[in-house]
Image (spheres, rainbow, N blue to C red):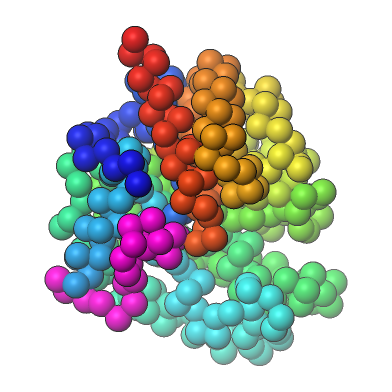
Amino acid sequence: MNFRKDFQPDYTNILKVLYNQRPDYLPLYEHHIDTPFIAKALGQEVNAAGKSGADLEEHYRVVTGFWKDMTYDAFDFEAAICDIFPGHGAIMGGMAGPIQTRDDFEKYPWDEIPVIFKRTYIPHLEAIKKVMPQGMKAYGGCGYGIFEASQDLVGYEYLCMLLYDDPELFRDLFLKIGDLFVVLWSWLLDNYKDLFVFCRMGDDLGYRTSTMLAPDTIREFILPQHKRVIDLVHSHGKKFLLHCCGNIFSIMDDILANGIDAKHSNEDQIAPFDVWIEKYNDKIGLFGGFDMNELILNPYDVVYEKVLREGTEFRKKTKGYGLGSGNSIPDYMSVDGFMAMVDAVNEIRAREKR
């Protein structure tokens, strides 16, 4: 591992992407780096499960230290909403969620969720506050999105049927999820907004070929709830990034109208990153650029040369741009592929100084 202990993070550098301005140097960005990957890269255990107090602080000291040594200006942290849902699991597929009928909806313990949320995540937020490296901040906030929450509470297939079997319940479900998100986001922003350089929602709305629900359904039920969160984030003086996988070009104008400041997630089989640049560079900041398959399947030299060449071009073509994978760094990512990307970005930075 080519650690760079002398790198000094500067969260204001990556924040410029959210203003769609050219950062002083090319920032690295990842939606997430799985802790099993960090453990593999470091050759040591990295796991927050069951930890508290000083042990939890040490966990986040290791995690944030890894991001810093890999020359990131900020790192991701999300207090994952769906993970604390009573009956969580349907979003993973293969099962129905806890809400299938009007009676299920009325009896669901909505009022308990904010209590569970705070109890679960305050220790993590406090630990991060204590160990954050100088010059760094987190990006993220409340994890999961409006559509993803509906999938966890109902199940994707069952949600599609609910739209036709009980359209009033379908409508009420999204209104209730929106209300819940406003409560949770409001609490987090009121108490911990200074931890975050910008806020982010991840809500995957598409497949490779289309959106997962009809565009008009997304426009009517999901995007208005997105806007509630976006407006809330902006009212607290923070910029907003949407991470959204899939072929969502049919609803991008509506997403832009909601007021997002930046977008992340791209897949070459949907569209080359140049298409995102051509369509949206003048409107919002852009993150990503490199399909996960390219990073996973190719050897170090191939990845390094590709990132060096295309990353240089992406930086020239864009206003606000942060380089990274098109999605995230999972546990099965090769360390060589990841390091080739990081090393190429640092070479781009070095060449700009010459």
Q: Position of residue 59 (x, y in %)?
A: 25, 65
Relative horizontal placement of residue 151, taking residue 200 as reference (left or right): right
Residue that protrudes farthest toward the top in the picture: 354
Q: Identify which residue, 205 or 94, lies in the foreground.
A: 94
Residue drawn at (52%, 40%), measured in percent from left and top?
Answer: 300
Question: Which stretch is magenta?
Answer: 34-54
Q: Measured from the top left, where is residue 27 in percent x and y? A: 40, 31
User: Of residues 35 and 29, which is closer to you in this image?
Assistant: 35
* Residue that appears at 54% across and 60% down: 332
Residue 126 painted magenta: no
**Residue 305 visible in the displayed image:** yes
Left or right: where does residue 112 sit relative to residue 314? Answer: left
- 277 or 195: which is nearer to us? 277
Q: Position of residue 63 (x, y in %)?
A: 30, 57
Image-based side of 217 in relation to 63, left or right: right
Residue 56, horizontal then vertical, whole percent: 23, 70
- Pick the residue in front: 326 or 293: 293
